[in-house]
Image (spheres, rainbow, N blue to C red):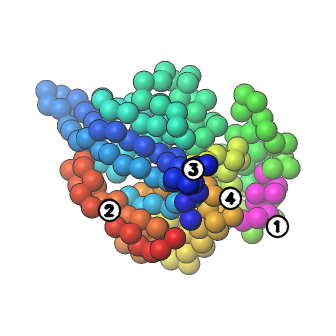
């Protein structure tokens, strides 16, 4: 259930205001996003769907501070990131955003616990003991017996849960997941989605999932449909 501010109004973790993203392609310009307005509130799980080329991954990258918009504003947890430089964006990503990718992006030479501890070790002002935090997160995700296994020794579903633990390492208010079940079998995908749902229920973390899978999208509280760089539909999937 979305959390509220002191006066009872919902607290938006993400706000976009007329976001435009234009990409030069030779002599032409691709209008990847065309004036996207949206709010996503604390504790929500929201899915973003749409056909290939609709702008889903572009929007997720902008929200995550991996790129900057051509125009418009993006506020993350009340902080305007629209015109930040790379150092400022790096700090925001480390503090406020956790990323989960389709292909896990784990470091193959490190164990599960070492992969999860890494973001804490790189934080400017670590709030946790890296190895203890990593062990606790992995145990909470059912991987207490896989702490010292390398990625090649884990199944796809286990690797994705390690990636989720890594994304949670610095306790960000926002998790961004780009096709988190796209490389998994159905059973592993369900386990990953259940883990994400449990995380947001237990900690109030906001979760945004880009997906092509209608079944994945339907598990979210709301679904935003993106077509040709614009939100054309917002659907409530279940009551909070």
Q: Could you tell me which residue is drawn at 69 percent across and 55 percent down?
A: 165
The reply to whether discs 2 and 3 touch (Cβ–Cβ < 8 Å) is no
139 falls in the magenta region: yes
Whole-angstrom CA distance, mark 3 to mark 1, is 45 Å
In the image, 162: left or right of 180? right
Secondary-structure class at tag 1: loop
Whole-angstrom CA distance, mark 3 to mark 4, is 21 Å
Q: Which one is earlier in the sequence, the residue at label 2 or at label 1?
A: 1
Q: Which one is earlier in the sequence, the residue at label 3 or at label 1?
A: 3
| Among the 4 quarters of the image, the one containing residue 72 | top left
The reply to whether discs 3 and 1 touch (Cβ–Cβ < 8 Å) is no
Q: Which one is earlier in the sequence, the residue at label 2 or at label 4?
A: 4
Q: Which one is earlier in the sequence, the residue at label 4 or at label 1?
A: 1
Q: Percent from the top left, x then y, of residue 211?
A: 40, 61
Q: Residues within 10 Å of mark 2 (few under 14, many from 20)?
A: some
Q: Is residue 150 above or below residue 119?
A: below
Q: Could you tell me which residue is drawn at 42 percent across and 36 percent down?
A: 74
In the image, 9: left or right of 94? left
Q: Which residue position is annotated with label 3?
A: 7
- The numbered dot on residue 203 is 4
Q: Could you tell me which residue is drawn at 46 percent across and 64 percent down?
A: 182
Whole-angstrom CA distance, mark 2 to mark 4, is 25 Å
Q: Is residue 183 above or below residue 163?
A: below
Q: Which residue position is annotated with label 2?
A: 234
Q: Could you tell me which residue is drawn at 59 percent across and 67 percent down?
A: 197
Q: Is residue 145 above or below residue 4?
A: below
The reply to whether discs 2 and 1 touch (Cβ–Cβ < 8 Å) is no
Q: Which one is earlier in the sequence, the residue at label 3 or at label 4?
A: 3
Whole-angstrom CA distance, mark 4 to mark 1, is 24 Å
């Amino acid at each position: 259930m979305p959390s509220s501010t002191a006066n009872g109004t919902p607290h938006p973790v993400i706000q976009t205001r007329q976001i435009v993203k234009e990409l030069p392609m030779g002599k032409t310009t691709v209008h990847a996003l065309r004036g996207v307005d949206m709010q996503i509130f604390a504790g929500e799980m929201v899915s973003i769907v749409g056909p290939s080329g609709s702008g889903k991954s572009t929007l997720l990258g902008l929200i995550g501070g991996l790129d900057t918009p051509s125009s418009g504003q993006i506020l993350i947890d009340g902080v305007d990131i629209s015109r930040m430089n790379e150092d400022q964006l790096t700090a925001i990503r480390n503090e406020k955003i956790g990323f989960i990718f389709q292909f896990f992006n784990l470091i193959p030479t490190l164990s599960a616990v070492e992969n999860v501890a890494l973001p804490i070790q790189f934080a400017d002002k670590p709030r946790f003991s890296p190895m203890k935090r990593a062990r606790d997160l992995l145990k909470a995700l059912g991987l207490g017996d896989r702490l010292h296994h390398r990625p090649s020794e884990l199944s796809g579903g286990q690797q994705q849960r390690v990636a989720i633990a890594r994304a949670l390492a610095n306790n960000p208010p926002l998790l961004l997941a780009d096709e988190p079940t796209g490389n998994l079998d159905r059973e592993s995908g369900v386990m990953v989605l259940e883990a994400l749902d449990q995380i947001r229920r237990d900690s109030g973390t906001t979760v945004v999932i880009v997906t092509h899978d209608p079944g994945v999208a339907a598990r979210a509280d709301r679904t935003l449909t993106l077509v040709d760089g614009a939100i054309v539909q917002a659907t409530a999937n279940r009551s909070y």
